[in-house]
């Protein structure tokens, strides 16, 4: 047994982290957010060069062919630097759908484009978790009708992958006749989600789709969102500690007051054990299939709660500055907020976890 | 990342399970399941089994009678023992003073004390806290004055667990009042039979006697009972505290407790006749704690793989004791009104009569009540937060 990251994984994570730290500082994040640019050219080009979009794409199709733990530690860095680039939909959920359910031709067409970063893929599976606003998609003779909400990586998508109510998956072109598409402006301006409305829209089914594949996409997405919160939370702690060491009141830095020290220590004690939880969840996706769905629920619900605690507490430590636009701490706060709600909030995933353990109907 | 146990570790686990199956009597594990405290004689019996097998000093080096196990083997052993409800052995000798003696003690001290700690024939207690020195331990005032080949000790210790059953006490005493607090402390081993020592009970919230005050009046302690150098005691004391905190996290014990609460929750009925697991509010609480515990468990595995990568012992102490206290609270919720009867004889295991209510109700409330101590002992959780702020975050 060796519970930890390999040397390669550490290098991968450090590499992506360093790149984002240099190429995606807060000013760049702000610039992208203010212009609603969810795929900023320069940054995306750099991400492509690192091979990140193809992390899960099999090597035969031009990707890195790595596992979900690798994807999770990259997503952690994305959260840490509130990176305004596609990832969960395009680089994680879409490759699962295509690899497991796509025809040979579909794989040949899309996987290399995903791996190279030439294709952005919006993914709509929200209604497989829970339905709001009468949303949901019905397939009839190969044509789609209905509505998909909270499509992940919606902006500038070259294709959408949408789950219908029978757990079939469909490729939909963004310019298909009868499709109308709307941005959903959320609190988090670093990631794009949108709404798709279908009126008898031509779509191309992924022939191998079934309920298990859709579930696997959702499990993976949840683990990524948990990892995103882990990274964002870690950064919020570090920012709080730095601020507490600089800000002076009563003639001394506020970090010398026990009330402030304890807030920082509590954040640390709450978040640090989460790291091992996220690692194991990512690992389970590849190596312990029986545990994967439950661990995805556990990681998602726990990181949602701990993330919220850290986000609030770090904001508290920053005093008045914490809730200004100027300081920009709110990008992390909101990132953690959206992570909590996408692909099932903690209440929902806890219910699913109870069902998986035979506790609830 | 590799979570498969190596073949030799699997074999080791099987060996431990076999030993438990052959030696841990039903009577003993039942007592622990119920939550009652096992008597000292019973504990000693269990310690003898382990000692005979050479499995008593899990963390000690082999030259002093330890197991020489790998970190993974220790982990497996502790987990199997907890899951089987084996009694927890007293930590004062085996986990606390033993390592101090073989690390900092001289040959005579090792010869005199280690074998009794291993066999369980000598029981130890810990003389650290004083009425005026709790969290601010270094301010301690119990005074030792050198007179010829002896120290004359005067003062008082408090919260001394099982002092009333102990043969020896390891004590922090002040030997220099003129220097920085930490630089004037000495670590002494004192025979509890020495004239001038008086032990008075402190009855705790659970109605039982675990704790004591220990008074020292002109107690004569040979200088040969001093560990290491005079005025260097704080170094040895801190070494011991780190060991203490890591053990306090109690991850395998909490895992066992979750299993038990799940059993209870399936059994216990809500007012409307449903089982407690059907109540989403209860499930929510239980699952939050279970996930928190999983995080700790995986973190322990992570520390096994790379000790430097893990969080500090203070983090483990805080989170571990929070989990323990939350679980004790949930257990009380699960047994509901059967947590109310106070049945001292049943708790102590000194009665043959059946308890009021089910067996599992007997110790639930008292475990919850005394469990409040967990966030205080071993350095209160507030002190741990200070340690994290200073040592981990640099504040």
Image (spheres, coloured by chain):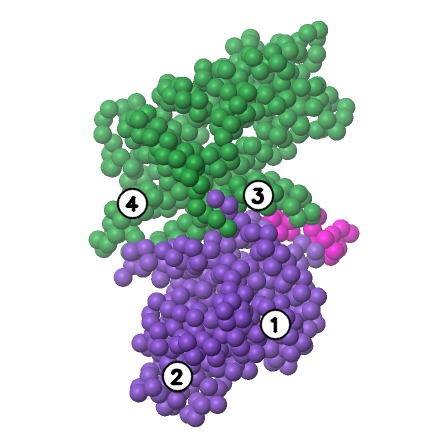
Chain colours: A purple, B green
Which residue position holds label 1? Answer: A48
Q: Which residue is drawn at 78% across and 52% down?
A: A251
Distance from Cα at disc 4 to Cα at disc 1:
51 Å
Give the residues in magenta.
A244-267
Q: Which chain carries label 3?
A: B
Please name which of the two marks, 3 or 2, marks the residue nearer to the observer: 2
- The percent coordinates of residue A237 (x first, y second) are 62, 56
Answer few, some or many: residues within 10 Å of disc 1's Cα (few below 14, many 20 plus, some between 14 and 19): some
Q: What element carries label 4?
A: helix
Q: Is mark 1 on a helix, strand or loop?
A: helix
Q: Mark 1 lies on which chain?
A: A
- Give whichever of discs 2 and 1 has the lower sequence position: 1
Is A253 magenta? The answer is yes
- The percent coordinates of residue B43 (x first, y second) are 38, 22
Is A124 magenta? The answer is no
What is the residue that sits farthest to the bottom in this orientation?
A: A177
- Give whichever of discs 4 and 3 has the lower sequence position: 4
Which residue position holds label 4? Answer: B263
Q: Nearer the viewer, residue B276 or B217?
A: B276
Which residue position holds label 3? Answer: B306
Q: What element carries label 3?
A: loop
């Amino acid at each position: 047994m060796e519970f930890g990251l390999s040397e390669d994984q550490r290098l991968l994570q450090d590499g992506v982290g360093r790149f984002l730290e240099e190429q995606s500082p807060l000013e760049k994040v702000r610039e992208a957010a203010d212009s609603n640019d969810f795929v900023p050219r320069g940054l995306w080009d750099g991400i492509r060069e690192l091979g990140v979009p193809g992390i899960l794409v099999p090597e035969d199709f031009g990707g890195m062919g790595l596992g979900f733990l690798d994807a999770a530690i990259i997503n952690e860095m994305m959260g840490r630097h509130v990176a305004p680039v596609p990832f969960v939909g395009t680089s994680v959920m879409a490759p699962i759908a295509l690899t497991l359910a796509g025809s040979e031709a579909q794989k040949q067409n899309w996987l290399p484009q995903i791996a190279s970063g030439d294709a952005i893929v919006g993914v709509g599976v929200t209604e497989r978790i829970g339905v709001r606003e009468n949303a949901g998609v019905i397939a009839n003779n190969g044509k789609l009708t209905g509505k998909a909400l909270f499509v992940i990586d919606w902006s500038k998508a070259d294709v959408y992958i949408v789950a219908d109510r029978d757990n079939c998956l469909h490729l939909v072109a963004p310019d298909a006749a009868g499709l109308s598409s709307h941005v959903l402006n959320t609190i988090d301006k670093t990631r794009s989600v949108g709404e798709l409305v279908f009126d008898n829209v031509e779509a191309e089914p992924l022939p191998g789709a079934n309920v298990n594949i859709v579930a696997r996409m959702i499990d993976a997405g949840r683990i990524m969102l948990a990892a995103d919160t882990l990274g964002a939370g870690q950064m919020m702690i570090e920012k709080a500690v730095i601020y507490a060491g600089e800000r002076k009141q009563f003639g001394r830095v506020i970090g010398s007051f026990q009330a402030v020290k304890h807030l920082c220590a509590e954040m640390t004690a709450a978040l640090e054990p989460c790291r091992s939880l996220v690692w194991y969840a990512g690992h389970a996706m590849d190596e312990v299939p029986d545990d994967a769905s439950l661990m995805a629920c556990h990681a998602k619900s726990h990181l949602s709660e701990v993330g919220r605690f850290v986000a609030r507490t770090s904001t508290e430590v920053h005093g008045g500055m914490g809730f200004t636009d100027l300081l920009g701490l709110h990008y992390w706060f909101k990132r953690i907020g959206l992570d909590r709600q996408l692909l099932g909030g903690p209440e929902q995933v806890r219910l699913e976890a109870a069902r998986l353990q035979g506790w609830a109907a | 990342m590799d979570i498969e146990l190596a073949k030799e570790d699997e074999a080791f686990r099987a060996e431990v399970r076999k030993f438990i199956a052959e030696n841990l009597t039903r009577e003993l594990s039942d007592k622990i399941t119920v939550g009652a405290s096992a008597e000292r004689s019973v504990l000693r019996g269990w310690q003898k089994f382990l000692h005979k097998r050479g499995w008593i000093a899990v963390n000690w080096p082999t030259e002093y009678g330890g197991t020489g196990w790998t970190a993974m083997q220790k982990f497996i052993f502790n987990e199997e023992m907890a899951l089987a409800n084996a009694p927890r052995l007293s930590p004062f000798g085996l986990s606390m003073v033993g390592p101090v003696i073989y690390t900092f003690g001289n040959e005579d001290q090792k010869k005199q004390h280690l074998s009794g700690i291993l066999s369980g024939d000598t029981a130890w207690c810990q003389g650290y806290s004083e009425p005026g020195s709790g969290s601010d331990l270094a301010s301690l005032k119990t005074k030792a004055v050198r007179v010829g080949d002896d120290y004359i000790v005067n003062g008082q210790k408090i919260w001394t667990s099982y002092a009333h059953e102990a043969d020896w006490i390891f004590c922090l005493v002040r030997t220099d009042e003129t220097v920085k607090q930490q630089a004037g402390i000495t670590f002494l081993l004192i025979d509890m039979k020495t004239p001038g020592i008086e032990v008075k009970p402190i009855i705790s919230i659970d109605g039982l006697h675990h704790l004591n005050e220990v008074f020292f009046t002109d107690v004569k302690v040979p200088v040969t009972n001093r560990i290491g150098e005079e005025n260097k005691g704080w170094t040895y004391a801190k070494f011991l505290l780190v060991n203490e905190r890591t053990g306090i996290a109690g991850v395998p014990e909490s895992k066992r407790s979750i299993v038990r609460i799940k059993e209870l929750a399936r059994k216990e009925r809500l007012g409307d006749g449903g089982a407690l697991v059907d109540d989403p509010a209860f499930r929510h609480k239980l699952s939050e704690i279970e996930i928190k515990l999983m995080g700790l468990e995986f973190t322990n595995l992570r520390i096994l793989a790379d000790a430097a990568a893990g969080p500090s012992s203070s983090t483990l102490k805080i989170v571990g004791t929070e989990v323990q206290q939350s679980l004790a609270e949930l257990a009380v919720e699960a047994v509901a009104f059967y947590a109310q009867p106070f049945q001292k004889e049943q708790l102590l295991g000194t009665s043959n009569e059946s308890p009021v209510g089910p067996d599992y109700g007997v110790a639930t409330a008292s475990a919850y009540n005394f469990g409040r101590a967990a966030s205080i002992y071993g350095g209160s959780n507030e002190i741990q937060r200070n340690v994290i702020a200073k040592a981990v975050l640099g504040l």
